[in-house]
Amino acid sequence: MPAPVKIRLVQMEVLPGRPVENTEKILNRISEARAAGRTLVVFPEMAIPGYLLGDEWERPAFLRECEACGEDIRVASAGITVMFGNVGVDWPRRNEDGRVRKYNALFIAENGCFLGPEGGPYPFVIKTLMPNYREFDDSRHFFDTRKLAAELGQDPRDLIAPVQTACGRIGAVLCEDAWDQDYAVSPLEILGGKSVDFVVNASCSPFTFNKNNKRNRVFSEAARRLQRPLVYVNNVGIQNNGKTVFTFDGASCIYDGQGNPMATLAPFAEGVMDHALSEALQFEVDHDLRARSLSDVSLFDAILYGTATFMKACGVERVVVGVSGGIDSAVVAALYRHILPADRLLLVNMPSRFNSPTTINLARELAKNLGCGYVEIPIEDSVKLTRAQVDGVDVRWPDGVKRLALADFQLENVQARDRSSRVLAAVAASFGGVFTCNANKSEMTVGYTTLYGDLGGYLANLADLWKGEVYELGRYLNETVFRRDVIPEGSFSVMPSAELSVAQAVDEGKGDPLNYSYHDTLFRSWVEDWNRSTPEEILEWYGEGTLEQHLDYPGCVKDLFPSPKHFIDDLERWWNHYQGLGIAKRIQAPPVLAVKRRAFGFDHRESQMGPRYTRRYKELKKQVIG
Amino acid sequence: MPAPVKIRLVQMEVLPGRPVENTEKILNRISEARAAGRTLVVFPEMAIPGYLLGDEWERPAFLRECEACGEDIRVASAGITVMFGNVGVDWPRRNEDGRVRKYNALFIAENGCFLGPEGGPYPFVIKTLMPNYREFDDSRHFFDTRKLAAELGQDPRDLIAPVQTACGRIGAVLCEDAWDQDYAVSPLEILGGKSVDFVVNASCSPFTFNKNNKRNRVFSEAARRLQRPLVYVNNVGIQNNGKTVFTFDGASCIYDGQGNPMATLAPFAEGVMDHALSEALQFEVDHDLRARSLSDVSLFDAILYGTATFMKACGVERVVVGVSGGIDSAVVAALYRHILPADRLLLVNMPSRFNSPTTINLARELAKNLGCGYVEIPIEDSVKLTRAQVDGVDVRWPDGVKRLALADFQLENVQARDRSSRVLAAVAASFGGVFTCNANKSEMTVGYTTLYGDLGGYLANLADLWKGEVYELGRYLNETVFRRDVIPEGSFSVMPSAELSVAQAVDEGKGDPLNYSYHDTLFRSWVEDWNRSTPEEILEWYGEGTLEQHLDYPGCVKDLFPSPKHFIDDLERWWNHYQGLGIAKRIQAPPVLAVKRRAFGFDHRESQMGPRYTRRYKELKKQVIG
């Protein structure tokens, strides 16, 4: 290997679907790297097109644009080795859907030429392992090494090979290629057997809370296994698949040949990092740069970054938040206040006769603490008008006139819709902005929200947090972010309530039908657990006395319910909501900002099939309640 | 081959996610087939679990239930050969996502045993070709033959083999396995080389308008190539992936060894069909049963079936339709009237001061013609109230009080939201039903709809039809379905208009900003064409003078626009809507009933990235307008 290799990692914000803008940035970074005397500059996976683009990949004009941008980079590679992700298009060949052949590819440009793996058919590296889980749809869009090998009558091992560059023999892979534990093929292992000088993994890897620890283990172990330094470059920014918005934290890192992380770029920020590799493959690095722990990436960081970047992407500059005095809307308001100047944030309280002075005062206090705009727009007159127009109205039928009636419980949803679809939407239009959806994940799971009411809004940025996590985020905002109680203490201590009827009077200690400390753990098991549980497992565990352990619920479930029948009634009530109307509501819900390992929307694909119970569940139920 | 083979095709309605109910039906059909002396009975792909289930496949309890149901069928196979689709689970092994190994499998049960392909590792046939386009996510959930072959160090050809049964050597495949033109591996070709007596294709293949002609060609050609009879069994029913609802038309068919279709089961209906194969592989069939043409499956059939079946699946028994007097709501109302008794359908007209007596009278006439319920609920008072509450309201800011204002154009959306979220939602609750979304595909494409307004509703059953197709469906309803003008002639002839401002006064010939006869073809090219076009191609074709030909637009585009600049302004205006707010609105739109080759939602995956134009487009634009 010609030494030393002066590597620059470029952790850039990739704008999805904007190849020209991304390429301009890449070209600037290349110029700067050359001026700084770097010999190798590495960009993330899909740095030109972006990655989560829906079916944008089906547009030939988009593919041609990406290809042309790649050419610009090739031309700009005089005297330097440039690695970057792009779509690799083989126009005469076809994908299995009959459309033009596309690869998720890593290009290596050097002195005006593209360099491919030794003996390979293309002047680019092909992603071998295709993630098809969570938000990923790789096989929908991209052909892969294994399919290509089958087509050529070769072994995939023949197609995975180092790339000989001026900076040495590089084992170049893309993202999932290093996450090989569940695949029959291991690109890194194959490369390890073909004498590489070092490994580069270019990624476009979304943030998931606590994933960086795993990522660190995977890459550290890979470097150790190969006994080669490993360079990991990931992008920042946000990308979405319609229903779900993902953040990318970057956290690009470099590992030595013993698997020690050397240094990590700060998360959720663009940045570059330089390292030099000696002839002996040793890092010439200041040890003060040793990797800082990544565990300090908080949910707050991700939500703040995701929200602010989404606003930028959508051109949102002014925000209206409906504030009830409760914790969810208070946390949303405080988050936006951290992003926006005071004059661009407007809080609206919309009391009906069911709203207590307690919560109205909390809303006022919140607005005062945040120093933003505040207005109270009562909905009582409108709800009365709707009642007058519907309750008792004469409908003409061929056989005569019949009257409609509107029951009290139906007026609950009338209020919720009135607030969002009538008031907030009009206020947002008038204010020149959008209004927010303040729903949390607990409510979203069981559809404890009103469609076109509190489930409306341009983005649901708390909808990946359980109710308990919303409280924690509220504390964090007061204690760590604002360092004063911007969210009034009363919003933490008041009974959580929709305040839509006398049965939900907070001053009488009445409120939501959910016991969040228990139900959060139950819903997590249904939604987020790896092998997602159903009432069958829950009842099995309940019978065994292991439910608390399985749910990680700190209390005792039997204390919550007077009898097994009550336990089962509660279980079925919420399962019916989760699998019934909950899905219908989520289909029409706003985009969810994903921060954990299973967010509603494109990450947790659902079909409306109604709630169902297995035969085994029915047997267990018989055993428990006879 | 032991002769004759007495085949029964069972075209059943598969209920997605309901293995026990499906299995009960299968067991009944097996008993009937045995009683009728049949020797082979064939059910569709995924007849036990259903197919489009979102991520239901990740629930171990669901997989165990499917497996247990499969066991019930095995036990019931005494004296008869039974073929049925189910998930094949290999519990100790893993999929590439790390979850339990699952196959899309075809089981063959005979005398209490499962029979697998000769020399294969499993007692079931594995689907080899995995569709990962449109609504299909096969690689997300299922391991396939090629991955298995790689894992076992075998050639896929070794794993694809006939199954020896009491009814002969059957070449058994699943759905996509026969649609092999874009794959490197052809399961049918491999089977053809291993001496099969006949071929069975079990499918779960959604209806797409005009797809049956292609299906017929593909299967006919396959039978001819192999010179073997081919049995094609498909299910009926509906299945959905949340945002998009698909119908299954069945149209199960049998082909002789020369590729001639022998007989076809009626579409969109359960049914069985018997055939006998002689020792010489000849059909013993009455030639009066020769295949009827499938071209008579109309969009009306699919929409009616899809809507009625979706209602049944969701438990919807009463429907409220907001009727404006225009064509879309009239067609929706007439469709529901064909499904529901008169007393379960309620039409609501909600005039504001912008609604002309012309359209109000058309709404009244429609209700009279349909003989259903009708009520007028004016929205004027509510809109006034909203205006009074928002326009001029004092907002408190830290630096003093400022007033909000509400512009006239903002009142347009206030009216639309008032109708759906305030009135229709309350009326539907009172009526004990749901309200419909009447949006068509033209409006959905460019978001010419109001979120929480006319884009609200439980199902958008016209949203896969262009405006022109809605008119055609209206004519079809009057002429063929009702055989009288239930939709008033005025609803066809009135200017299409939202009637939300004086600028949209229908009696003055003012209305929608869309010229549907042209824009329908433009939008179709963006949304439905195989290689979806963008402004780049449109402008290229415009410059070449080939735009009309590419769009299949019968007029002359240059007659529509006074200058190239006007053409480009219009193009960019609608492209900006389609790729901008249109996506934001579709994310929160109701489920779309898919009937054609590209429906919004899960079939046409989208990411919010804002409208974009390629460099090539910008060059062309310069050439055209300098």
Image (cartoon, coloured by chain):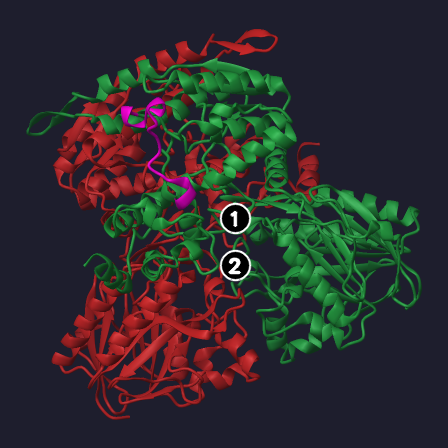
Chain colours: A red, B green
**Is disc 1 placed on a helix, strand or loop?**
helix
Near-viewer residue (A134 or A597) = A134
Residue B533 among those drawn in magenta: no
Highlighted magenta segment, given as a residue range: B501-518
Q: Position of residue A434 (x, y in %)?
A: 26, 37
Of the 4 image quadrants, the one containing the N terminus of chain B is bottom right
Q: What's the mark number on residue B225?
A: none
Q: Position of residue B206 (x, y in %)?
A: 62, 50
Q: Would residue B151 be seen by someone viewing this image from the given angle?
A: yes
Q: Quadrant of residue A48?
A: bottom left
Label 2 sits on what residue type?
Tyr
Which chain hosts label 1?
Answer: A
Give the CA distance from mark 1 to mark 2: 38 Å
Query: In this rendering, would A502 be left or right of B163?
Result: left
Q: Is residue B250 above or below residue A580?
A: below
Residue marked by disc 1: A550
The nearer-to-camera label among 1 and 2 is: 2
Q: Position of residue B119 (x, y in %)?
A: 76, 75
Label 1 sits on what residue type?
His
Disc 2: CA contacts within 10 A as few (<14), some (14-19) or many (>=20): some
Residue marked by disc 2: B133
Near-viewer residue (B215 or B174) = B215
Image point (55%, 56%), residue name: B136
Q: Is residue B228 above or below residue A284?
A: above
**Is disc 2 placed on a helix, strand or loop?**
loop
